[in-house]
Image (cartoon, grey):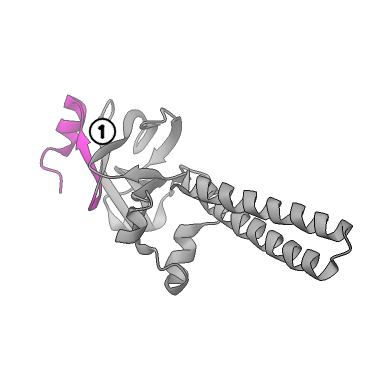
Amino acid sequence: MHTDAVALVFAVFGLLLLALATQRLLRARFFAAGGSAVAGLLLLGVGAVIFTVSLNLHTYARLTYERPAAEIVFEARGPQRYRATITQIPSGEMQMFILAGDEWQLDARVLKWRGWANLLGLDAQYRLERVSGRYRDIEQERRDERTVYSLSDNPGIDLWLLSSRYPRWLPMVDAVYGSATYLPMADGARYQILMTQSGLIARPANAAAQAATRGWE
C-alpha cells in the first residue's frame, strides 16, 4: 500500500469518527461524542502528516535498478563559460543554466528503506538536487565566479533532512546520503547521467564528450 492510500485510509476513518461524534452530540452523549471527536481529529492529523510526507516523496524517482536520470548538453559561451541544457528522465523537464569553469557536477539525494518498508512498496528513491560548474585549478576555484543552481523544489515535509538529523524517529529509513558525479565541459558535448544502486554515474554520449574525457583524470 502506497503512502497516498495510507493517508486516505486515515482521513476516511477520521471523518467517520467525526460524523459519529456529531451524531452522539445531537443525542446529548457528550462524553462519548468527545472521545470520538478526539480520535477522529487524531486520525485526520496522522493522515495529514502522511500526506505531506508523500508530497515530498513524489519529488523523488523510484530506484530499483540502474536507470537513466538525465541528459546534459553543453554549448560554449566564452572562455570557461558554457550553457548547460539538462533534460530530466523520464519527466522530460528541461532546464538551462550558464555554468562557469572547466567541469560540471551534478548532485542527488538518495533515500534507502529497510526491508519491511520495501514490502510496503517503498523502493530506494532519488532526486536530482543541483548542478554546478567546477574549475580544474583549485586556486581558481577559490577566487573566481561560482555557479550553482537548484534542480528541484522541496514541498511538504523534508523526509531526507529529518531522517539525517533524527534517525531514531524514522526507523523505516535505512540510509540517506548524497551522491555526485562530474566530468569536463566542452562545446557540443552530451552526457547521459544514470542512477545506480551505488549512486550517480555519467557517460559520454557523443564524440565531443568522448574527446573531452579522453585522458581526463
Is residue 171 positioned above or below 76 on the image?
Answer: below
Is 152 situated left or right of 190 in this image? right
Residue at coordinates 35% horizontally, 44% vertically from top-left? Answer: 62
Displayed quadrant of residue 64:
top left
Question: Residue at point 75% right, 55% down?
Answer: 20
Residue at 70%, 56% in the rendered image: 17
Rendered position, 165 above or below 107: below
In magenta, the rendered stretch is: 197-217
Residue type (three-letter) at the residue carrying disc 1: Tyr
Q: Nearer the viewer, residue 34 or 80?
A: 34
The image quadrant of residue 172 is bottom left
9 or 126, nearer to the observer? 9
Q: Is residue 125 left or right of residue 152?
A: left
Q: Position of residue 157 (x, y in %)?
A: 55, 56
Whether residue 160 sits left or right of residue 140 in the image: it is right
- Residue sitting nearer the eye, 118 or 126: 118
Q: Neighbour class for label 1 at 10 Å: few (<14), some, many (≥20)?
A: many
**One can see residue 26 in this view:** yes
Residue furthest bottom in the image: 168
Q: Is residue 56 above or below residue 30?
A: above
Identity of the residue drawn at 67% across and 55% down: 14
Q: Which residue is mark 1?
A: 191
- SS at mark 1 in the image: strand
